[in-house]
Image (cartoon, rainbow, N blue to C red):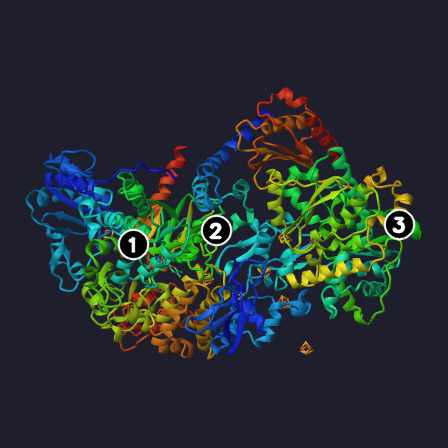
Amino acid sequence: MADTAIKKLTVNGREVTFSDERNLLEVIRKAGIDIPTFCYHSELSIYGACRLCLVDVEGKGVMASCSTKPAAGMVIQTDTKEIRNMRKINLELLLANHNRECPTCTRSASCALQAIAHRLGVETVRFKAPRKEEPIDDSSPSLVRDPNKCVLCGDCVRVCSEIQGIGAIDFAFRGSSAKIAPAFDASLGQVECVNCGQCAAVCPTGALTPKQDSSKVWEALYDRSKTVVVQVAPAVRVALGEYFGAKPGENVAGKLVAALKLMGFKHVYDTSFTADMTIFEEANELLERIQGGGELPMFTSCCPAWVKYVEIYFPELLPNVSSCRSPQAMFGSVAKKVLPEQFGCRREDLVVVSIMPCTAKKFEAQLPKFSVDGKPEVDIVITTSEVQRMINSLGIQLQELEPEAFDMPMGFATGGGVIFGASGGVMEAALRYVAEKLDNKPLKKVDFKQVRGMEHLKEATLEIAGNEIRVAVVHGLANTKKLLQDIKAGKVKYHFVEVMACPGGCISGGGQPWGATDRIRIQRQQGLYNTDKAHQVQKPQDNWLVQRCYEEHIGGKPGSHEAHHLLHTEYQNRSQIFDAKLPIMRGVESNRLPITVTICANQENCPGQLLLGMLSSYVKDKKYTPWVDMDAAFSSRPAQDGTICVTVGDQIVERTHFHNAMNTLEQLQNQAAFKKITDAIDKGLAQIR
Amino acid sequence: MKESVEKTKAMVQHLAAVNAILEKNGHDPGRLIPILQETQEVYKYLPRDVISYLATSLDVPVAHVYGVATFYAHFSLEPKGKHIIRICDGTACHVKKSTAIQQHIYQRLGLNDEKRTTDDLLFTLEMVSCLGACGLAPVVVIDEEVHGQVTPAMVDTILDQIIAAEKTAKGEE
Amino acid sequence: MTSIPAKTPDLEQMAAHYQRQAAQLKRRVIICGGTGCIANGALKVRDAVCAEMEKAGQKAVVDLLEHEDHSGETYFSKSGCQGFCQVGPIMRIEPEGIFYCHVKPEDAAEIVNVTLKTGEIIDRLVYVDPVSKKPQRHEDEITFYTRQNRVVLKNCLIEPDNIEEYIYKEGYQAARKALTEMSAEQICQTIIDAGLRGRGGGGFPTGLKWKFTLASKGDKKYVICNADEGDPGAFMDRSVMEGNPHAVLEGMLIAGKAVGADEGVVYVRTEYPLAVQRMRGAIEAAEKHGLLGDNLFQSGFNFHIRVVEGAGAFVCGEETALIASIEGKRGMPSPKPPFPAERGLYGKPTVINSVETLASIPYIIREGVEVFRSVGTEKSPGTKTFALTGHVANTGLIEVPFGATLREIVYNIGGGVTDNAGHVTGEDFKAVQIGGPSGGCLTPDLLDLPLDFDSLKNAGAMVGSGGLVVMNKQTCMVSIARFFMQFTQNESCGKCVPCREGTKQMLALLDDIINGRADENTLELLEQTAKAVQLGSLCGLGKTAPNPVLSTLRNFREEYEAHVYRKICPTGECKALARPEIDAALCKGCTACARKCPVGAITGKVKEVHVIDADKCIKCGACKAACRFNAITGI
Ligand SMILES: Cc1cc2nc3c(=O)[nH]c(=O)nc-3n(C[C@H](O)[C@H](O)[C@H](O)COP(=O)(O)O)c2cc1C
Ligand code: SF4
Ligand code: SF4
Ligand code: SF4
Ligand code: SF4
Ligand code: SF4
Ligand code: SF4
Ligand code: SF4
Ligand code: SF4
Ligand code: FES
Ligand code: FES
Ligand code: FES
């Protein structure tokens, strides 16, 4: 039970009250003294590594305030000569081991290292021991890792494991060789990172930053032959203003539109438009699944970090994920289909830019499945922080601008499409749609407050026209993992589950202004809900421009064939362990088709061994050998049935169901799955040769 | 086809050793260190594929296992030489000039601070701090055998013996 | 954990069994079976002697438990490290108490045919005191031992693999008493009254620690025996585990009862394979005899112990890092509070004690508080083991009461300070580094300081793990400080900024000094950094890492200044600062140096004064070693 009685202690001679604060640091900060820290985040476990938060506790000596419980009667000095010297030397030590290039550093404006060094008056760096220069890792489409700017505070590691339950990066080596790295020092783009960018959102320095793509945008804008349009995601508008002195949650959409026009964007659209469209598709899909006995629960699919997460860790749940594309991707496909005609330009001259709160969207946009003829449907994704720098680089005074409206038709959105940016928003928008559909009469009360707020897991059971609909909303992938395990174990049952990777949803995505706390998150969420209230239309289904778009371009109605083509997608199983590989054959040509068969090493008679043999015979029989690299990849995920997964090129041929280890060769050969694989090989080879 | 089945069988058997270790330790991620120790005993180092395989089996991130394996001095991610020479550079041995022994072996085997394994993978030289035989300082351990009050000449004799033994073993093959 | 069926061990019966067997023996020969002596061939000696026995038609036995009837047999038992590895392999022959050292397999026949037959002593094999140069034939004559007060190490002469002998020596009686006659509170109170302070470094009162752990609520608690012994140059814990493993187990058992734990973990560094083996063997034997397991002595108390091997990280001696390591994580310390007593292994209340602390427990419970307190000082009662190494005639493991002076240790037990050639000259003492990489150095003026936890702390050093390195006048203190700095910077876990970055920079600054690159700011920056690291570091490693630097800076500042301002190393150890010169007054022109110089830097005619070409010289020191007339200086 939390102790909430009011107690007192003394900070720098002043009496301060406290109750259930979890440590001295919080008490002291509440008292108005901002002790510098690198390694403390209220949402993360206490780590105690930066040693900046040291204070003197009378009778006990110097202690780290982040890891000391407040006690009544404590007498605390936050600053003594020794502590001050220690902090300064501490900073000097860090800077000595730091690639100091502030003027050109992405994080210059919000760098905690720079700010604290400045605050403490560190003016020289007297240490000279040479720094080891480490290569910069920019393999990920979402993030750049610069180990030369890392202060090893471990914030990223804890976010990735505690909040996201992933652990894609961790500490490696020790002592002065210690560093943050993915397994085997591989690059971030090659490991199980889901691109959420939460690590960059807590990194106090420029060691982990969203990838900067704005120069590509300038390129496009300067290119006279291109028509450049831009979509703005809902969450951007309630955070961008923070850079320009606005309060968190203040909606600056109108000013942003004006600024983007000043930059030269031809048309400025609102991603909330396709968010509304998502509801048309997704709510329909849900109703179909409920009424037609499809796989339940259904999961939302608008967060690419979450989608990648299921693909890696819970591939067996992929059939439960809505096949709808994210609003960004829907916007891309619709824009590329509709706008060239409208503008009278060639499809390849239309450049679609996204402004997103999200680093995972950069990853999503470059997925081959969202390209047509090798050209991505969304050409460039930039984040809130990048658009801020673009605004500044042009010298635009955002707050001075007169707000302007989004362009039509794809700039028109309902309140339901806007709240997508907050955890629970997609669910609420969908419920507005589903409730009305099931009830068959106009929905009066559009607010579903049960699914709002910052709780880790929000659940609701709704009675709609005699139907009971059970829903859940979860954010943070560690929370999600728990929920998925419960769902798999049959402990809980839902019809519909919304998942957002970032805490509180996109409002605190990896591309948002740095330094979000729960207080700021709630303000940003509130900003979206206020916008929703202010909208003349709140229910997505009432977006007549979306309806018209369906009529004119997308087969007339949700779920149509054309809608499936433009607005839906398929998923990949990414669950293999690629490091445990055994080369089976190596081709000699320069252009080769990689084939991998995952087999289970726990079973003596894994049918994968037979399958592998069959595939290698097949390749030899067909005389494909010079063009094929074949590997056995080992899996030991404790699946009793030893599932086999085959990749041909970069395509993952569906998990094949050779469940019975006693399968004979004939049985295997007769299975359709084998045919499916050989077909894929034939196709792959045809392309290569 | 036969060939690849055989190859895979071999790999499965190869990983069977890991499976047995995992089994013995109850697939308990809390026993990661003994698991790595036992694995290293089998492979003499920790191959990358084996680490990935272990991590997945234990349901912990590969980066975590990598982090643990690189933290402890005893784990090696590189193949080591057949014979391991460990020179003690603990306090007692240091004041009795263990660095001179180190320099001697460096010269003799063509090694240095970065390069610790000979090209023929015959020797790996490690510096350790205290083997608990300080009374015999300086101490060198070669293949588990402890040698006390070591001099460069002693080292030469032992190395000569090993090299000669390796040569005859090779010649007999 | 397998449940071991309750079986009431009858200690008296086991002791009687041992006594019956021992009484039948003709003789007992104790061969040291510690790591050091085994390295020197002790087991080969034993086998050779046994073979000779057989040749001579005499019966030899190495394992009493092998068969029942031992009449007329000579028992070749092994012991744990007897602390004097330097003169190993060591052989003691009972009942005369003959002490042989440096025994070789070649001596076997003579030992069998002379000493074992007639009791006559072979003079070649006896120990000769390095100071008096007199032979000391019996163990009770050897100053190295007579000046000690061996309590914890006393039982190190028993056969560690025979649990019955330990029981015969009153082993497990304290455990029985604690389990059947004492309450947890009473045990804690007894240890508090005894004033036992942790031997692992900090000197925290053990009884209090137990009391806190007892008071912590938890459905499960643990006892951890810290046997990581990472201090380079200390091997007390290894010796205790190898020689007297059951004392450690018994101590853990009592600790378990005192704090309410039912599981114990021994965390041993993996560099100690023999200790691991002996501990595992002892656990097995104790389980077999119902001394570990469930419902021990029918008291309803359960206790199980397992051994966990470390994987090579000094920092894992720190409590929270040790716990992380047992849990399969990187051994990175975490902030305290919470202390392990509240939240330790797997989040449960845990008490962590060092090997030596735990091995002292049975003695206190068995003999009582008064007996324990009868030696040592008021605030630091009892005895302490030290690993005496460095430039001292007798190096080895010693045990002395707290309050003994350095002079006693260095000159009486240690037999005096040696020069680099190993001779005791009587005037070579420069300093003692005590407490390993966390400790500090003591200078000649502190030779009469009574050593205990508090006096050492006041002197800017610490008991630490008990490493005690004697250094002679040819030792450069800056180099020694650098050596420890190198160690701590290698072993820093890298978690917190002051330690990770600070030790690295301090090492770089010391390198600057040693290599002549230092300037007038170096010493100040070094000192400031040292203080910041001391104040700011997260765990004991970083907090104490600057101690060797600060203490040498305090005691040997002029030596630092010579390096920094005059660019010379007074001891000539720092090669980069060396300026070898030939003293014309001393040079006899013998040409030895010129012949040895690898680069031909020395010129001169026979019988004429030689000169060194400073430009050519690579400062290798070969000339100095070659010169029989001490004519070469500055290196
Ligand atoms: C870096 C570091 C290394 C340590 N190494 C050891 C060690 O090897 N053995 C040990 O008993 N204590 C070691 N300690 C002290 C332990 O953390 C702990 O205080 C001790 O085990 C408590 O036991 P005691 O109360 O019996 O002394 C170390 C402490 C630090 C900070
Ligand atoms: S991370 Fe901070 S201190 Fe480092 S270069 Fe960037 S702005 Fe400067
Ligand atoms: S203030 Fe002067 S020195 Fe500093 S950045 Fe500006 S121009 Fe350069
Ligand atoms: S982007 Fe997300 S998943 Fe990737 S490392 Fe950062 S926190 Fe982990
Ligand atoms: S990358 Fe950033 S968050 Fe991660 S440890 Fe380094 S400085 Fe901290
Ligand atoms: S929650 Fe939003 S911002 Fe975060 S990864 Fe998902 S889509 Fe991107
Ligand atoms: S003081 Fe050193 S060893 Fe201890 S936590 Fe900090 S970095 Fe690690
Ligand atoms: S120190 Fe070495 S190089 Fe210099 S003179 Fe002497 S022998 Fe020659
Ligand atoms: S060895 Fe000594 S005495 Fe002989 S020539 Fe050299 S300096 Fe002179
Ligand atoms: S905030 Fe307390 S140590 Fe970093
Ligand atoms: S210091 Fe070398 S063995 Fe202990
Ligand atoms: S090992 Fe024999 S005396 Fe130390």
Check disc 1 and report the residue beneath it: C358
Residue A216 point in image, percent of width and height: 78, 58
Check disc 3 and report the residue beneath it: A544
Secondary structure beneath dot 3 equals helix
Residue A285 point in image, percent of width and height: 77, 40
Q: Which tag is nearer the camera, tag 3 or tag 2?
A: 3
Q: Share a chain, discs 1 and 3?
A: no
Q: Share a chain, discs 3 and 2?
A: no
Q: Which tag is nearer the camera, tag 1 or tag 3?
A: 3
Residue A483 point in image, percent of width and height: 62, 45
Please identify the quarter of the rendering in which residue C448 is found.
bottom left
Secondary structure beneath dot 1 equals helix
Check disc 2 and report the residue beneath it: C329
Q: Which tag is nearer the camera, tag 2 or tag 1?
A: 1
Q: Is residue C625 above or below residue C89?
A: below
Q: Is residue A44 above or below residue C107?
A: below
Amino acid type at image mark 3: Trp
- The reply, left or right, for residue C453 in relation to residue A106 is left
- What is the CA distance from the residue labelled 2 to the residue labelled 1? 26 Å
- What is the CA distance from the residue labelled 1 to the residue labelled 3? 80 Å
Chain of residue at mark 3: A
Q: Residues within 10 Å of mark 3 (few under 14, many from 20)?
A: some
Chain of residue at mark 2: C
Which image quadrant: the C terminus of chain A?
top right
Asked whether the viewer can see residue C393, the reply is no
Of residues C116 and A500, the one drawn nearer to the viewer in this rendering: A500
Chain of residue at mark 1: C
Amino acid type at image mark 2: Lys
CB under 8 Å between discs 2 and 1: no
Asked whether the viewer can see residue A381, the reply is yes
Residue C446 point in image, percent of width and height: 26, 74
